[in-house]
Image: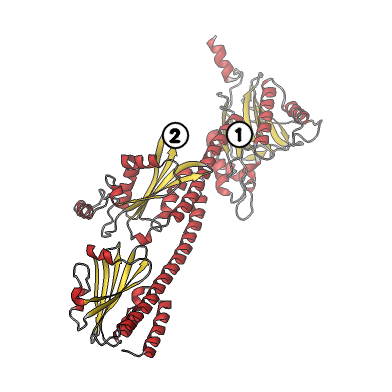
């Protein structure tokens, strides 16, 4: 037989090739040729099996032949199941004449060669399948030495396959870690519940699966919220399944709070919309071809891909409670299915992102509800004044802001406008906001002048030992018989109101005073001026003026120009327009924006100057 030195050199080359190989089949030439050079060997043949009896691959090389015979198949050979090895390789000698074609697909090739004996080593590659490597030998062969060489070659093949699997697992772990990190970034970048749920579905396809469905857990049961698929047609089918399919609804209901990911395939999907048989797939393909747009495509049919459909269901649990579930649909080889550990990690991250979005949504509703109670539900309605307000929450974390405004009618026929800003945000600021607005409102409704109202509010803040200061401005608007109105303004450290005249000019109401809540005894001086018909008074908080663009300029610098451009518009349009312009202008600055706008419509000389609501009462009498 071939010299030991020659075999040793060949074995050394085989180990070197194994260290570089990305597939076991790449070792074929380095295995077959040295074995075939062994004395008495006429044929070398190898097979690869899956699921005990499914022949996937057979390769044979005969002495004197330059090219191997290669058969790639998926043929079931039930009788071959008895050949499946245990954990250790098994070497067997069998006369070629004794080989049964029903369990030995190599038999036909062996009969074509002079060898009388088949020496074969069967061995396990992984949990999914096994393989064999054998040689046909004649009487001149040293069978014991041949067996030794087969065992050595198998050792290299097994080591190569193990290394490939290990490198694959490491690469897969790296890819999984990268995907999980990217998934966290994508999902955490949105606090909108529906957008977060849609991102959960989109991130996983096609990296994890061909399709995904996400359900949110409601008190009445699972609620479908998002679906995606690599195929647009099948995405539509998934959406319909997610919304209406009773089989899936029952499955999700049964899962309940089970934390383990479950995989379903084959008979487990019978009766489901994912049931996947070759006949059903062929029928679906034919239906798709005849209908054109493929709206009727089943998620279990992957076009030309004949891999059986597998689905997995993972419970989305965060902070001790179930928030929903994610269902993945796979049409890929078993080797490319994600692990349960990976799906659990993805589900945990998705659940936290969804829960954060849900908590944010609850907080947003709570904050907006509280904010609404800190602001007037409506402004006075009168023919003499066109009143409107605007409020824009600027804090992305949605703490309750300290901005407030109000407008009240007074016994003398005038209207009082007030606006203020409490330092800071949160519950303490909200409490102070409520105290300030309601105190000023009560005093002004009783006819207290602006300066006295602010002084009494300051005294109340000091008595309550308020830890925060606030700014405010109060303006009374008193109609006069000549069609003008007297504007009386008093400020406590607040930005000065602006007056937009009917001719388009803009002026600032010059007034000032110490902010509230700092010193015990403070008095405030008033500033008076007249406004005419169609003149507009604009009160605002510093969230408007301090909105800053990327270059560093404040909206305050362009506010007069922007306000002048709104000449002729009603109060509602002016308030909303200025708010949106400031919001669009700012690249930085997250303060709330509050505006209160009053346009004087003018009254004829000698007209009844009582407030409109009182006019209605008198008329009713």
* Left/right of residue 409 with respect to residue 262 in the rendered view: right
Mark 2 nearby-residue class (10 Å; few <14, some 14–19, many ≥20): few
Identify which residue is drawn at 19% across, 84% down.
Answer: 114
* Secondary element at image label 2: loop
Task: Tell me the residue that label 2 is attached to.
Answer: 219
Q: Quadrant of residue 389?
A: top right
Residue at mark 1 to residue at mark 2: CA–CA distance: 42 Å
Q: Quadrant of residue 83?
A: bottom left
Q: Is residue 17 above or below residue 557?
A: below
Q: Is residue 371 above or below residue 189?
A: above
Whether residue 204 is visible, yes or no, is: yes
Q: Nearer the viewer, residue 373 or 594?
A: 373
Mark 1 nearby-residue class (10 Å; few <14, some 14–19, many ≥20): many
Identify which residue is drawn at 42% across, 40% down.
Answer: 256
Identify which residue is drawn at 39% across, 71% down.
Answer: 161
Colour scheme shown: secondary structure
Q: How many marks?
A: 2
State which tag comes first along the sequence, 1 or 2.
2
Q: Position of residue 551 (x, y in %)?
A: 62, 56
* Residue at far top of view: 621
* Left/right of residue 547 with respect to residue 197 in the rendered view: right
* Secondary element at image label 1: strand
Q: Quadrant of the C terminus?
A: top right
Whether residue 274 is visible, yes or no, is: no
Discs 1/2, front: 2
Q: Position of residue 208 (x, y in %)?
A: 40, 57
Identify which residue is drawn at 24% across, 53% down.
Answer: 277
Task: Tell me the residue that label 1 is attached to.
Answer: 596
Q: Nearer the viewer, residue 15 or 473?
A: 15
Q: Position of residue 238 (x, y in %)?
A: 33, 47
Question: Which numbered tag is attached to residue 574?
Answer: none
């Amino acid at each position: 037989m071939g010299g030991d030195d020659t075999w040793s050199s060949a074995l050394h080359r085989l180990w070197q090739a194994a260290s570089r190989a990305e597939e076991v089949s790449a070792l074929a030439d380095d295995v077959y040729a040295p074995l075939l050079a062994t004395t008495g060997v006429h044929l070398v043949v190898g097979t690869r099996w899956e699921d005990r009896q499914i022949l996937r691959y057979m390769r044979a090389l005969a002495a004197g032949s330059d090219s191997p015979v290669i058969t790639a198949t998926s043929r079931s050979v039930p009788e071959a199941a008895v050949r499946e090895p245990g954990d250790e390789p098994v070497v067997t000698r069998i006369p070629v004449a004794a080989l049964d074609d029903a369990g030995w697909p190599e038999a036909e090739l062996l009969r074509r060669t002079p060898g009388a004996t088949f020496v074969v080593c069967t061995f396990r590659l992984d949990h999914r399948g096994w393989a064999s490597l054998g040689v046909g030998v004649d009487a001149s062969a040293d069978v014991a030495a041949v067996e030794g060489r087969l065992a050595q070659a198998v050792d290299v093949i097994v080591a190569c396959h193990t290394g490939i699997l290990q490198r694959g697992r490491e690469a897969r772990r790296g890819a999984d870690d990268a995907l999980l990190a990217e998934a966290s970034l994508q999902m955490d970048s949105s606090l909108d519940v529906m957008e977060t749920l849609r991102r959960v579905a989109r991130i996983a396809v096609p990296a994890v699966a061909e399709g995904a469905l996400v359900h949110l857990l409601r008190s009445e049961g699972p609620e479908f919220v998002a679906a995606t698929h690599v195929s647009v047609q099948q995405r539509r089918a998934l959406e319909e399944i997610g919304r209406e399919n009773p089989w899936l609804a029952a499955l999700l209901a049964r899962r309940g709070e089970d934390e383990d990911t479950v995989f379903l395939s084959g008979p487990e999907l019978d009766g489901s919309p994912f049931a996947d048989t070759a006949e059903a797939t062929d029928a679906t393909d034919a239906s798709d071809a005849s209908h054109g747009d493929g709206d009727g495509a089943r998620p279990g049919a992957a076009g030309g891909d004949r891999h059986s459909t597998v689905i997995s269901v993972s419970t989305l649990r965060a902070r001790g409670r179930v928030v929903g579930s994610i269902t993945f649909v796979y049409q890929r080889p078993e080797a490319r299915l994600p692990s349960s550990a990976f799906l659990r990690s993805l589900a945990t991250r998705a659940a936290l992102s969804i829960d954060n979005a849900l908590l944010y949504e609850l907080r947003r509703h709570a904050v907006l509800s509280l904010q609404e109670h800190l602001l007037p539900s409506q402004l006075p309605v009168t023919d003499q004044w066109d009143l409107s307000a605007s409020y824009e929450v600027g804090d992305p974390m949605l703490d309750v802001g300290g901005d407030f405004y109000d407008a009240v009618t007074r016994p003398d026929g005038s209207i009082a406008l007030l606006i203020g800003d409490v330092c800071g945000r949160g519950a303490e600021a909200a409490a102070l906001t409520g105290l300030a607005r309601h105190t000023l409102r009560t005093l002004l409704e009783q006819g207290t002048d602006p300066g006295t109202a602010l002084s009494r509010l300051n005294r109340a803040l000091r008595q309550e030992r308020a830890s925060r200061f606030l700014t405010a401005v109060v303006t009374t608007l008193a109609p006069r018989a000549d069609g003008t109105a007297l504007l009386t303004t008093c400020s406590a450290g607040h930005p000065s109101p602006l007056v937009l005249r009917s001719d388009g000019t803009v002026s600032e109401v010059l007034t000032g005073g110490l902010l509230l809540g700092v010193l015990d005894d403070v008095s405030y001086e008033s500033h008076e001026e007249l406004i005419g018909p169609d003149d507009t008074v604009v009160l605002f908080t510093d969230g408007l003026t301090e909105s800053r663009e990327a270059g560093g300029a404040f909206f305050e610098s362009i506010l007069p120009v922007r306000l002048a451009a709104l000449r002729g518009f009603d109060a509602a349009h002016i308030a909303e327009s200025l708010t949106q312009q400031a919001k669009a202008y700012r690249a930085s600055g997250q303060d709330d924006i509050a505006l209160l706008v009053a346009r004087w419509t003018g009254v004829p000389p000698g007209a009844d100057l009582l407030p409109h609501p009182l006019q209605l009462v008198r008329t009713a009498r």
